[in-house]
Image (spheres, grey):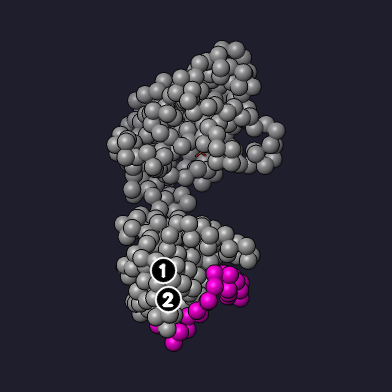
């Protein structure tokens, strides 16, 4: 679960990570009043669930009071990577001496919790990792001690990140606090980019990104309260409402599958045959035709989809019910895309018979279906 920068910074203050005294506003007039009280210059920052705001015009400095409202007005008209800007964080501008990168995250490739650092911060870390991989520092921490690290343990890493002993000590204290916060709030990421050394040597978190582990939300009502539904992917939310698991990906083959394991297997085999899935969609293990409708509606909404691959293994799910759902969807809304259907298991003969008389393609095996979907997707 994502939260906004202003919420992440509130958490930082709670856990003793130094950050600027920012104020959230929603109108240009408010921005101007806040800037007047705060003193100039100020930096206005769009609050959207997306990185790279700087490049998209979502981070702007204003040096004169008469600029503030105009900058805010322009920012409130922006849509950044599909997210309309509704809130702006007004921050006192900081004189930056150096910018570094510091995060604490779960590294899935090593199954470890790790601090990641880089003495050059500000820009996107993925870019730095490409252009200068040797500048990326790692410090793995066993989960059992993450909540009570000491500054001494963090010092060797901190010293590589910033110049000066007192600055490194400040970074080490921040790392200790990050560890406590990570455990206490069940985070999956805490990212500070940039972590800056100010003119007089003060270390401050200038930006904040925090992700919570969705699977731990049940024991953190205080985390769930921070959720901003209006800032989340609307399609993924619609899916959730229909009890369908849907995650958008970057490819062009729309997949609809029952069961998470089969959905992953389907994505793998599509990749194996040279295709690229447009989504992960698990319609779950039931025969509810509404889920088929909701799933196909989500897939067809995505303009990059060129072919739909429906892969069902009927256990509790009856394939004829699924086939009826697909036919109903085709009747209810226009699907101008080739559809490949592979039905196996309970009532698959009946299901295949229903599909056979249509313009959809029935595949007999998983391999055949995936190959066919990839070929049709490429042919368009
Ligand atoms: P992001 O683009 O969404 O990551 O937004 P950030 O909050 O990280 O800001 C992007 C960049 O703007 C930072 O790396 C800084 O270089 C610059 N910036 C942000 N706030 C200030 C500030 O108070 N003073 C100065 N000089 N630069 C700032
Ligand atoms: Mn940033």
The residue under label 1 is 314
| SS label for mark 2 | helix
The residue under label 2 is 348
- What residue appears at the point 49 percent right and 66 percent down from the top-left corner? 254
* Disc with the residue nearer the chain's start (1 vs 2): 1
Is residue 64 shown to the viewer in this render?
no
Residue 285 falls left or right of residue 164:
left
Q: Is residue 40 magenta?
A: no
How many marks overall?
A: 2
Query: Callout 2 environment at 10 Å: few (<14), some (14 to 19), or many (20+)?
Result: many
Image height check: is 36 above or below 289?
A: above
Q: Is residue 369 magenta?
A: yes
Image height check: is 52 above or below 289?
A: above
Q: Nearer the viewer, residue 348 or 115?
A: 348
- What residue appears at the point 41 percent right and 39 percent down from the top-left corner? 213
Q: Nearer the viewer, residue 254 or 35?
A: 254
Query: Callout 1 environment at 10 Å: few (<14), some (14 to 19), or many (20+)?
Result: many
Image height check: is 200 above or below 317?
A: above
Residue 302 in the image: state x and y as whole percent.
46, 65
Residue 42 falls left or right of residue 119:
left
Q: Are marks 1 and 2 in contact (CB under 8 Å)?
A: yes
- What residue appears at the point 64 percent right and 22 percent down from the top-left corner? 160
- The quadrant holding residue 140 is top right
Q: CA distance from mark 1 to mark 2?
A: 7 Å
Predominant SS along the magenta part: helix
Residue 247: give its label. none
Residue 13 in the image: state x and y as whole percent.
39, 24
Q: Nearer the viewer, residue 36 or 99?
A: 99
Q: Look at the image and give the residue range highlighted in magenta.
A: 354-379
Instruction: Please identify the quadrant where the C terminus is shown.
Output: bottom right
């Amino acid at each position: 679960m994502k939260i906004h920068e202003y919420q992440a910074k509130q958490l930082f203050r709670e856990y003793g990570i130094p950050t600027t005294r920012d104020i959230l506003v929603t109108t240009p007039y408010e921005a101007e009043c806040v800037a007047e009280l705060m003193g100039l210059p100020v930096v206005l920052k769009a609050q959207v669930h997306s990185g790279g705001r700087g490049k998209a015009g979502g981070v702007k400095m204003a040096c004169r009071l008469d600029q503030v409202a105009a900058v805010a007005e322009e920012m409130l008209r922006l849509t950044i990577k599909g997210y309309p800007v509704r809130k702006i964080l007004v921050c006192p501008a900081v004189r930056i001496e150096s910018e570094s990168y510091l995060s604490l995250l779960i590294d899935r490739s090593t199954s470890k919790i790790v601090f990641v650092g880089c003495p050059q911060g500000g820009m996107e870390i993925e870019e730095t990792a490409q252009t200068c991989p040797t500048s990326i520092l790692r410090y793995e921490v066993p989960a059992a001690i993450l909540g009570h690290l000491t500054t001494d343990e963090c010092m060797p890493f901190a010293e590589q990140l910033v110049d000066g002993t007192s600055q490194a000590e400040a970074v080490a204290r921040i790392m200790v606090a990050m560890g406590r916060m990570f455990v206490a709030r069940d985070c999956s990421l805490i990212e500070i980019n940039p972590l800056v050394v100010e003119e007089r040597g003060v270390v401050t978190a200038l930006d904040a990104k925090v992700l919570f582990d969705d699977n731990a939300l049940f024991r953190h009502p205080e985390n769930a309260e921070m959720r901003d539904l209006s800032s989340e992917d609307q399609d993924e939310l619609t899916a959730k409402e229909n009890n369908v698991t849907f995650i958008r990906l970057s490819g062009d083959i729309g997949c609809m599958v029952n069961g998470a394991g089969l959905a992953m297997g389907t994505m793998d085999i599509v990749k194996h045959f040279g295709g690229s899935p447009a989504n992960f969609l698990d319609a779950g293990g039931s025969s509810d035709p509404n889920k088929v409708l909701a799933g196909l509606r989500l897939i067809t909404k995505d303009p990059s989809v060129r072919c739909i691959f429906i892969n069902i293994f009927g256990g509790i799910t009856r394939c004829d019910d699924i086939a009826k759902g697909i036919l109903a969807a085709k009747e209810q809304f226009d699907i101008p895309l080739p559809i490949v259907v592979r039905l196996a298991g309970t009532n698959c003969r009946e299901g295949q018979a229903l599909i056979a008389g249509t313009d959809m393609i029935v595949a007999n095996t998983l391999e055949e279906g995936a190959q066919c979907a990839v070929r049709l997707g490429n042919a368009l």
